[in-house]
Image (spheres, rainbow, N blue to C red):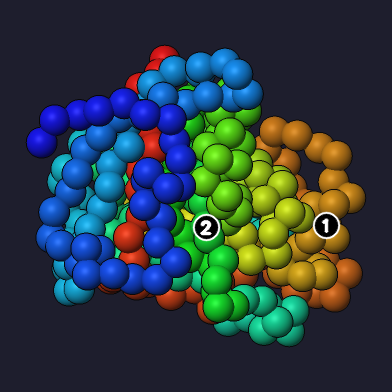
Amino acid sequence: MGSRRYDIDTRRCGIHSRPTKSMYLDAQQIVSCQTRVGDHDVGSCAVKHHFPSPIVSWIEDLSSFGNASFNPVSEYVDEQARASVGQSSASSNLHDMQISVRLTAEFMELAKENTSNNLETCGILGASFRDGTYFVTMLIIPKQEGTAHSCQAVSEEEIHAVLSEQSLYPAGWIHTHPSQTCFLSSIDLHTQYSYQVMLPEAVAIVVAPTDPTRSYGIFRLTEPGGMDVLRECDESGFHTHRETTNGSPIYETCSKVHFNPNLRFEIVDLRSAQ
């Protein structure tokens, strides 16, 4: 199937308000698009349309991620920031969120080269909202700069342009820990705060392919405990945080987040415009 170019537009990209038969075709359509900020082109990007079948199996082959070694002890772990399991009382008031069962695997494929070189990769989640639920229907891979222990998106106006044109909420982010355990570092906590202060349901997905006990996690800051700590913290870089006033962990494993094998999503890789 040939490629064609067009401005990102919800009518053309086909984000549907409810599942249709076409969503369940076991096929992928690759097209290209032109991203604009206002009246200016910011470059071309790849858009991958996904039509997963109703039954999708996900098998991680850890050998495909290269020779990144597992580091169980690190100076980058904030000892006060240990995730709790379950939910805080405030979390019970949040809306549900649904994520495609294929999203994490597709993200790891896009991050494969960086992961093999022990460099972190990040992506942004875009979600629609209907019937009281957030549906993650877009994964944006921004231009970025990464190290073994951090990743920073650049040209963030391009991310906002894509989300705005698609009328999507910034529903959180996903990033790799190529040689670290599955946790949120102090820098990750500040990144998550910037999303969660805008949307309480926003999530942080960490994928740690070399962690032998937990290959991925989906986290949120606790409310009010963790949110209060980050709201008052002006430090940058890797640092420790004070304990929460109510004694709760700073962040927790998410509840009310569900993997959906039938949920269609798109990938916009802005790195191709570099």
Q: Nearer the viewer, residue 110 or 181?
A: 110
List x then y, in percent, for residue 113: 27, 30
Q: Is residue 99 visible?
A: yes
Residue at mark 1: 229
Of badges 2 and 1, nearer the viewer stands: 2
Residue at mark 2: 127
Image quadrant where one finds the C terminus: top left
Task: Please tell me whether residue 205 is drawn above or below residue 24 in the rendered image.
Answer: above
In the rendered structure, the answer to whether residue 74 lies left or right of residue 267 reads right
Of helix, strand and loop, which one carries label 1?
A: helix
Residue at the far front in the pictured view: 11
Task: Please tell me whether residue 235 is drawn above or below residue 34 in the rendered image.
Answer: below
Query: Quadrant of the rendered structure where residue 26 is?
Result: bottom left
The crowding category of the residue bearing disc 1, from other C-alpha atoms within 10 Å (few below 14, some 14 to 19, many at least 20), is many
Of helix, strand and loop, which one carries label 2?
A: strand
Q: Which amino acid, by three-letter code, is at mark 1?
A: Val
- The structure residue drawn at horizontal position 46% and vertical position 40%, both measured from the top left corner, is 9
Tell which circle, 2 or 1, labels the residue nearer the N-terminal end.
2
Q: Nearer the viewer, residue 150 or 171?
A: 171
The crowding category of the residue bearing disc 2, from other C-alpha atoms within 10 Å (few below 14, some 14 to 19, many at least 20), is many
Q: CA distance from mark 2 to mark 1?
A: 27 Å
Image quadrant where one finds the N terminus: top left
